[in-house]
Amino acid sequence: MPYSNDLGPSIYSKRKLSGQKSEQKLTTVSNSNLIAPSYWAIKTSEGGGKNSKEHWSMFEREKVVAIGWERVAIDPSRVNAAELLVAVHAAYPDNKPGADNFAVRTIRDFVELPIDSLMMICRGYTPNQSDGKSVQVYAFARVTGQLMAVPYVAGQWRFRRPAMLQGIYKTLSVGVMRDLLKLGSLRQTMHQLSREQIKAIAAELGNLCTSSASSA
């Protein structure tokens, strides 16, 4: 059957985090649940080449979408942009010029995602990758809850949003992704998309599933 990108409503039951010795508590906010949902691609990897680290298993295990900058010591949902900028610079003093502002924009976009926003969870691609290379699409996720700033654990993304995940586990070629998304590269942590772009990816994945079933 063709893949449907309408994940529908869901109920997310927050899990108690155990085995983490910290006084920092899970926090939630409720400032975005009346805004129309938006559409995004979100990457699961950080770094590049041999230093790349993959976080998909955590997304899948915890039923969340997440972003990095885990060394930022504050809850970004509790501060304004200026305060967040100070915290980012303190956490990453060796950032290149412009990197702090990019981090603040991305973190705030993530914090402000409206409930029911739809995200394509995938790996990215660079401008110089050939069209024939493959891009892993792990899942589509419907955001179901507000920001959780979980206790810091080195190397683990701690800024998370509860989500209902529908696994895909398919690949599309870089050429197809470029054609459908009209993006020469997919390198940033999050890329805002249109509903039409999400539907085009879902339709392509549905065709891929149908083709696989027919040849089985």
Image (cartoon, rainbow, N blue to C red):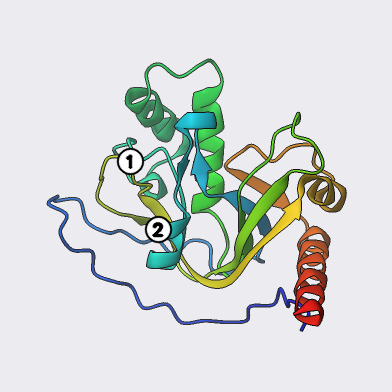
Q: As rendered, which of 123 and 64 lies closer to the eye? A: 123
The residue that label 2 is drawn on is 58
Residue at mark 1: 155
User: Quick one: SS at disc 2?
Assistant: helix
- Within 10 Å of disc 1 (Cα), the crowding (few <14, some 14-19, many 20+) is few
Residue 11 can be seen, yes or no: yes
Q: What residue type is labelled 2?
A: Met
Residue 39, image x, y percentages: 69, 59
Q: In this view, does 20 lie to the left or right of 215?
A: left
Q: Position of residue 150 (x, y in %)?
A: 29, 54
In the current view of this chain or complex, which residue is farthest to the right?
179
Residue at the image point whose x is 68% and y is 40% from the top: 125
Q: Within the image, what quadrant is residue 70 found in?
A: top left
Query: Split into 4 quadrants, where in the image is the C terminus?
Result: bottom right
Q: Is residue 111 left or right of residue 36?
A: left
**Residue 16 in picture, x, y percent from top left:** 24, 69
Dot placed on the residue nearer the N-terminal end, 1 or 2 = 2
Give coordinates of residue 87: x percent, y percent.
Answer: 35, 30
As shown in the figure, which amino acid type bears the numbered disc 1? Answer: Gly
In the depicted view, which residue is nearer to us: 31 or 165? 165
Give the farthest residue toward the front. 216
**Residue at point 35%, 49% (across, down):** 158
Q: Which residue is drawn at 69% across and 77% down?
A: 6
Vertical order, 169 against 189 (above or below)? below
Q: In terms of secondary structure, where does tag 1 sit? A: loop
Residues at marks 1 and 2, CA–CA distance in whole angstroms: 12 Å
Residue 48 appears in the figure: no
- Classify residue 151 as left or right of residue 51: left
> The N terminus is located in which quarter?
bottom right
Q: Which residue is drawn at 37% across and 18% down?
A: 93
